[in-house]
């Protein structure tokens, strides 16, 4: 059993910052990767950021240079630091974890960026 719980979403003005958290619990060993997708209304989910074990983060083109993924292993938590936010960043942000061929998902946290 794996649980992923996101937090930290909210309303922010364009140019501002938010820090999302994803806390993992249950059977959390041997995750190959963890990261974030997002989904805006009427759109498909798109990759925001991912991190494999011991690797530098990988980012979607639209967020490169603005977002940073990190983790705190002691807390079993993955973070997404979002800077220079734009209205087009408005979406539900979903945390994920991968183990072999299995994917696990959180329920999402809403991020809204006003003009």
Image (cartoon, grey):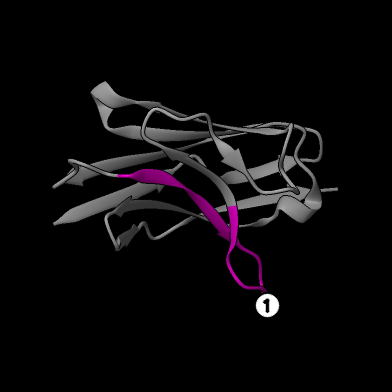
Residue 110, placed above or below residue 80: below
Residue 13, given in percent of the width and then of the height, sits at 77, 40
- How crowded pointer 1 is (Cα within 10 Å; few <14, some 14-19, many 20+) is rated as few
**Picture mark count:** 1
The residue stretch that appears in magenta? 32-47
Residue 26, given in percent of the width and then of the height, sits at 14, 47
The one nearer the camera, 111 or 79, is 79
Residue in view at x 61 percent, y 50 percent: 111
Going by the picture, which residue comes out furthest to the bottom?
Answer: 42
Q: On the image, numbered disc 1 is attached to which residue?
A: 42
Looking at the rendered structure, the secondary structure element under dot 1 is loop
Residue 22, given in percent of the width and then of the height, sits at 38, 41
Residue 45, given in percent of the width and then of the height, sits at 58, 66
Q: Is residue 28 left or right of residue 84?
A: left
* Magenta-drawn stretch contains 33: yes
Residue in view at x 70 percent, y 31 percent: 83
The one nearer the camera, 15 or 35, is 35
Residue in view at x 78 percent, y 55 percent: 88
* Magenta-drawn stretch contains 43: yes
Residue in view at x 52 percent, y 29 percent: 56
Q: Is residue 13 left or right of residue 42?
A: right
């Amino acid at each position: 059993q794996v649980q992923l719980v996101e937090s930290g979403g909210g309303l922010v003005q364009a140019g501002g910052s938010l820090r999302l958290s994803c806390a993992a619990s249950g059977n959390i060993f041997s995750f190959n990767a963890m990261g974030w997708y997002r989904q805006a209304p009427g759109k498909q989910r798109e990759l925001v950021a991912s991190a494999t074990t011991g690797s530098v983060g990988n980012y979607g083109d639209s967020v490169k240079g603005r977002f940073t993924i990190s983790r705190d292993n002691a807390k079993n938590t993955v973070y997404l630091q979002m800077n220079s936010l734009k209205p087009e960043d408005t979406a539900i942000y979903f945390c994920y974890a991968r183990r072999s061929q299995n994917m696990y998902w959180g329920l999402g946290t809403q991020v809204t960026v006003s003009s």
